[in-house]
Amino acid sequence: MRYTIDRMTMADVPRVIEIERLAYPSTWPPSAYRKELQDNRWAHYIVLRDKKIAEEHFSMAAQEPEKPRRLFPLSLLPGRQSVTLPPPNLASIIGFAGLWLMVDEAHITTIAMHPGFRRLGLGEYMLVSLIDIAYSIGAKWVTLEVRITNYNAQNLYRKYSFHEAGIRHRYYSDNNEDALIMWTDEINSSAYKQKFQELKAMLMYKLENQ
């Protein structure tokens, strides 16, 4: 398959920050991600890679390794007309996501996708990967906050049996927008497991045949 999920490493943080700046109006400082990776044993972060981009950057580096080139996924950044060619494994990152384990709850902290790769099922791929992590670390529920006006994200979460559980007023600092709190049902129940595996299988088939 063209897309892969890897655990986030310290080397990925600069690229993660670039993606976050493209995806959201307000961002975490780089030190926050480094602290999460180094000090928070309850944190689990992943990156989504596009192997096609990595292959293109290997080819570009082989042809003209000394010449700086524009990195397409960063081309939307204001004032970034050209950048030094980054390592292919870093350039290939097009999204990232993470969660915290809080007792028996997996709290999704972020899901961010480069704008040029939206509406391809890749945000769903990261959500599925986070739910898989929730299973592996012994969580019973998955929870998150989402902007009250982000209907597309809410519809995706409802697809995976998240339901509304409350409001966090003025949660987002950039515009004081409210956040909708959403929770899954108990993910270890037979009904949830069956639905999740069915949805995951359909998604993987879609991604493998793009």
Image: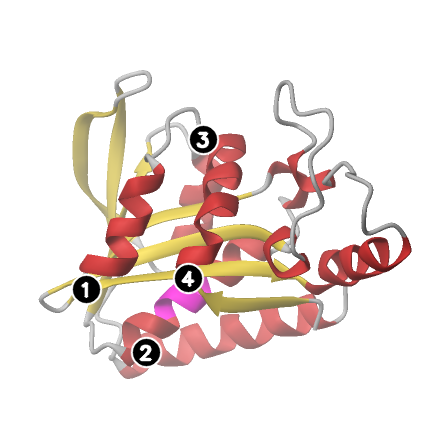
Can you say which quadrant of the picture contains the C terminus? bottom right
- Quick check: is 58 in the magenta stretch? no
Q: Are circles 1 and 2 on residues that touch, CB within 8 Å? A: no
Q: Are marks 3 and 2 in contact (CB under 8 Å)?
A: no
Dot 4 amino acid type: Thr
Residue type, numbered disc 2? Ala
To which quarter of the image does residue 209 belong? bottom right
Q: Which mark identifies residue 9?
A: 4
Q: Which mark is first along the chain, 4 or 2?
A: 4
Could you tell whether 1 is left or right of 161 in the image?
right
| Tag 2 secondary structure | helix
Q: Considering only vertical position in the picture, is 127 above or below 26?
A: below
Cα distance in 3D space between marks 2 and 4: 35 Å
Alpha carbon distance from label 3 to label 2: 34 Å
Q: Which mark is residue 2?
A: none
In the displayed structure, would residue 175 be above or below residue 126?
above
Q: Which residue is mark 1?
A: 42
C-alpha distance separating marks 1 and 3: 24 Å
Q: Secondary structure at mark 1?
A: loop
